[in-house]
Image (cartoon, grey):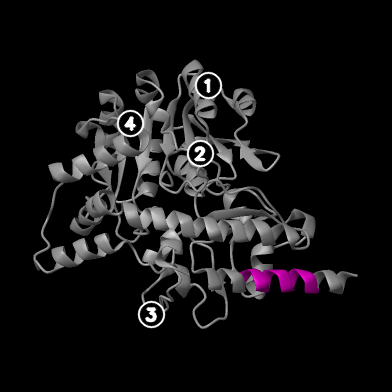
Amino acid sequence: MSNNDNPPWARFDFDEVVDRTKSASFKWDKYEARDIIPLWVADMDFRSPPAVVDALCERATHGVFGYTHVTPELERAVQNELSNQYGWHVGAEWIVWLPGLVSGLNVLCRSVGKPGDEVLTSTPIYPPFMSAPLLAGKRLLKAPLVRRGNRWEIDVPAFENLVTPSTKLLLLCSPHNPVGTVWSRQELTDIAEFALRHDLIIGSDEIHAGLVLDEDKRHVPIAALSAEVAARTVTLLSPSKTFNIPGIGCSCAVVSDPGLRRDFCRAMEGIVPHVGIFGYVATQAAYEKGGPWLTALLDYLRGNRDLLEQQVPAMPGLKIAHVEATYLAWIDVRLAQIERPGEFFEEAGVGLSDGCEFDAPGFVRLNFGCRRSLLVEALRRMREALESRRRACV
């Protein structure tokens, strides 16, 4: 194969074996000293972009790590990223910095409405979407997603059946974790019109916006639909998933409305810590110089996604919808009639996230942000465990 025939990801070695077992890895230490491949929590096993590593090393050599602040260069990096990728032009004053997206969800649920009010979302969903409203003293309303053909979709009529005058906040995950759907402009317009009709604030988690795998699809920030929609939207963003730096701790909320932004900031006071210096450094480097790495990553992840979508449906009792974005596959295990699928696959040597955590028993979530050889081995173990179980039941 000539250099011109190399796949885009060949410039970066995503097949490299990176030993995470001695790195205090939350993901890998769960199964310490056990032969279980960890494909659960949402971080990737790849090295972060070289530009990010270089920027962190350069800053570390300074040797003084005092209190820090956001620079105009960092603000411009975020503004340029949103403008260049999504055609969304935001003011620097709209950006509120956070040490993590989960804290942003909790701040949002505390800043909108009063105790006893309702928060509406779709399930299955990333677990903090369900815990944050409860921790804020709010009631949670859940409308199940619906699968149509090979795709999961939001059921807006189900929202209409649930909403009441006490509903104040709609939580959206875009692209969606765990089902991997990229909401179309029309779908987002329908959601926004629903929110406008019922005077709801929209909290949109767009942490996976940079991980759209389908080349014919494009992420659309819901706040970018119109100034009217933006005025009632808090958008939560971070480079952490896209550039594999979740342990760095840097996110932001983009809030165009001054009153909504004031309420959000007040809810942070005395509770939410400042972002550390390495978070700012990594974020700026990722947005300014991480593009070539990300292009290569997406190509590699598409290969992993395609492998999953070929092999999982051939396994007894398993179904999978098409993964449009993220590095997370949502697998339907209900036909296999396995009572505790997470435990079943752990016993087979594969650590997955059980769907119960996402309010969807009978499903598992598989993180395919890993080297392909590891994914191949995990799929082999899953297939053999299912086939062995089927033979035992005959």
**Marks 1 and 2, Cα distance to the nearest angstrom?**
23 Å
- Looking at marks 1 and 3 on the same chain, the residue that comes earlier in the sequence is marked by 3
Foreground disc of the pair 4, 2: 2
Q: Are marks 1 and 4 in contact (CB under 8 Å)?
A: no
Q: N-terminal of the two: label 4 or label 2?
A: 4
Q: What residue is shown at x 29% (from left), y 59% (from top)?
A: 248
In contact (CB < 8 Å): disc 3 and disc 2: no
Residue at x-position 40% and y-position 42%: 105
Q: Nearer the viewer, residue 262 or 194?
A: 194
Q: Which residue is mark 3?
A: 22
The residue identified by callout 1 is 194
Q: What crowding class fits label 3: few (fewer than 14 Cα within 10 Å), some (14-19), or many (20 or more)?
A: few
| First along the sequence among labels 1 and 4 | 4
Distance in Å between CA atoms under marks 3 and 2: 39 Å
Task: Single out the mark in the foreground, 1 or 2.
Answer: 2
Q: Which residue is mark 2?
A: 217
Inspect this view and state whether residue 9 appears.
yes
Is residue 109 or residue 242 the one in the foreground?
Answer: 242
Question: What residue is drawn where x is 64% and y is 41%?
Answer: 151
Residue range corresponding to the magenta coloring: 378-388
